[in-house]
Image (cartoon, rainbow, N blue to C red):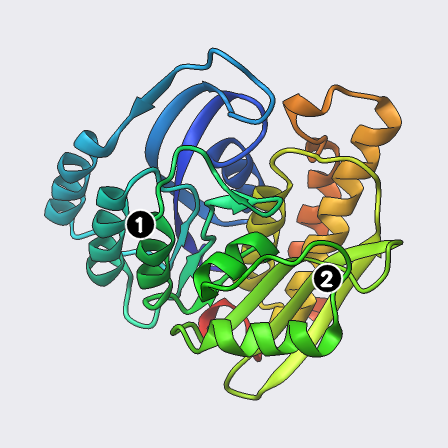
Amino acid sequence: MRIQKNILAVHDISCVGKCSLTVALPILSAAGCTVSVLPTAVLSTHTGGFEGFTFRDLTGDLPGILKHWRALGLRFDAIYTGYLGSIEQLRLVSRLIDEFRAPGAPACVDPVMADGGRLYASFGPDFPPGMAALCRKADLILPNRTEAALLLREPYREGTQNRNRTEETLRRLSELGPRRVVLTGVSFSPEETGCAVYDRDTDEIGYAFSQKIEGAYHGTGDVFASALIGALANGFSLIQSAREAVGFTCGAIERTHLAGTEIRYGVNFEEGLAEYSRRMLPDPAEKSERKKEGNLDEI
């Protein structure tokens, strides 16, 4: 019997709309991980396409939670952060990474703060530098293209990308501190979309693409990041994990598109969980053949 990885997911909770913790918890659980959560805020819905949503900031609750965990002597096998709503939360999470990760445990930061060329309206100009400081503590970061531009303090470029410029961006993001980078929203042609991955230790770059489906689907960044981290926890290499995550996310988008579901409510990732779990937890003989380089233990 294997020992489960205990992953701490630090995200908000949107009561309606599939994103953040309501995505991370089931996907990482399907990957066979124990998932502990630290909620940063509670919203009635996510903020994409909804008006009049409620928002409760939980910053004031976090020190008490961490004090209790400290008394219990808790340590986590990985820490995975998503939406952080303020500079104060960035500071708290930075201290959390120092104190609560087990020896050698990776910190995986999804620097959720922007998309489509724009910083989210709830953040001020001081937030991207604050997020960049948190990324310096990370072993792995997963920005989209807008977030990458903000972290690097450079203009956002719309449309398909240049391969050489993409690879330069990956290396520059790694210079912020993380040894590994996964850049999402990468596309070298109008028909495809996916991600690029970089491992600074080997200077290797890889890509994972799928067919592009038109439309803006909420929560897919969280679906992708959670699926990737679940794969890493099961011994997949970084590029293998990226391919698993792209396939899983693409399947969720395709099911949602074919069903004609209102996209404000998120993508149908649930019907892909059984197959994802099977791929994460194969027969022991199959699992022994996996490459270990770049997995969660090696990040």
Which of the pair 144/237 is nearer the observer? 144
Q: Residues within 10 Å of mark 2 (few under 14, many from 20)?
A: many
Across and down, in percent, residue 193 comes to 78, 55
Dot label at residue 126 = 1
Lower sequence index among marks 1 and 2: 1
Name which residue type carries label 2: Arg
Query: Taking 166 as reference, is 14 above or below it?
Result: above
Residue 46 in view? yes
Q: Position of residue 64 (x, y in %)?
A: 13, 35
* Residue 283 appearing in the image: no
Looking at the image, do the residues carrying marks 1 and 2 touch, with CB atoms under 8 Å apart?
no
Residue indicated by mark 2: 243
Residue 269 against residue 238 in the figure, above or below: above
Q: Residue at x 63, y 49 (%)?
A: 224
Above/below status of 271 relative to 163: above
Q: Residue furthest front?
A: 155
Q: Is residue 184 left or right of residue 248?
A: left
Check disc 1 and give the amino acid type.
Asp
Q: Residue at x 65, y 55 (%)?
A: 280
Residue 78's label in the rendered image is none
> Relative to 109, is 181 on the left or the right?
right
Q: Residues within 10 Å of mark 1 (few under 14, many from 20)?
A: few
Looking at the rendered structure, the secondary structure element under dot 2 is: helix
